[in-house]
Image (spheres, rainbow, N blue to C red):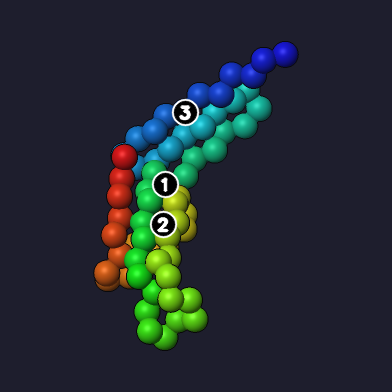
Amino acid sequence: MTKVISLDIGTGFVKACSDIKKVQFPALYAYREAGEWEDQKERIEGTGIDAVKISEYPKSVVMRP
């Protein structure tokens, strides 16, 4: 049995649909450098909902498709 999955990658959201379920999440990738007060010293990055949270920082870089 084959399942069909469709993707709609837009500038605002990515929508993934199948015959069972539909999922929607922000179409974003974001990163920022860790601040001096944070434990980790590396770049912090994320996609989707995590990217929305990262984008709240002033020096974050946000990319959209």
The amino acid pointed to by label 2 is: Ala
Query: In this rendering, would 9 be left or right of 64?
Result: right
Comes first in the chain, label 1 or label 2: 1
The answer to which quarter of the image holds residue 8 is top left
SS at mark 1 in the image = strand
Could you say which quadrant of the image residue 19 lies in?
Answer: top right
**Residue 51 shows which numbered tag?**
2
* Label pair 1/2, CB-CB below 8 angstroms: yes
The image shows residue 6, relative to residue 57, as above or below, that is: above
Q: Is residue 1 visible from the viewing direction of this image?
A: yes
Viewer-closest of 57 and 61: 61
Amino acid, disc 3:
Leu
Q: Residues within 10 Å of mark 3 (few under 14, many from 20)?
A: few
Residue 45 in picture, x, y percent from top left:
42, 60
Residue ID at (35%, 70%): 33
Residue 7 is tagged as 3
**Residue name at image x 37 percent, y 79 percent:** 35
Above-or-below relation of 35 to 20: below
Tell me the quadrant of the picture where the C terminus can be found.
top left
Q: Position of residue 37 (x, y in %)?
A: 42, 86
As drawn, which residue projects farthest toward the front?
Answer: 42
Mark earlier in primary sequence (3, 1): 3
Kindly identify the amino acid type of the residue bearing the numbered disc 1.
Answer: Pro
Residue 9, compared with residue 25, is above or below; it is above
* C-alpha gap between disc 3 and disc 1: 13 Å
Relative side of 10 to 7, left or right: left
Q: Which mark is residue 16?
A: none
For mark 1, what is the residue?
Answer: 26
Crowding near the residue tagged with mark 2, few <14, some 14–19, many ≥20 C-alpha atoms within 10 Å: many
Q: How many marks?
A: 3
Q: Which residue sits at x=40%, y=66%?
A: 43
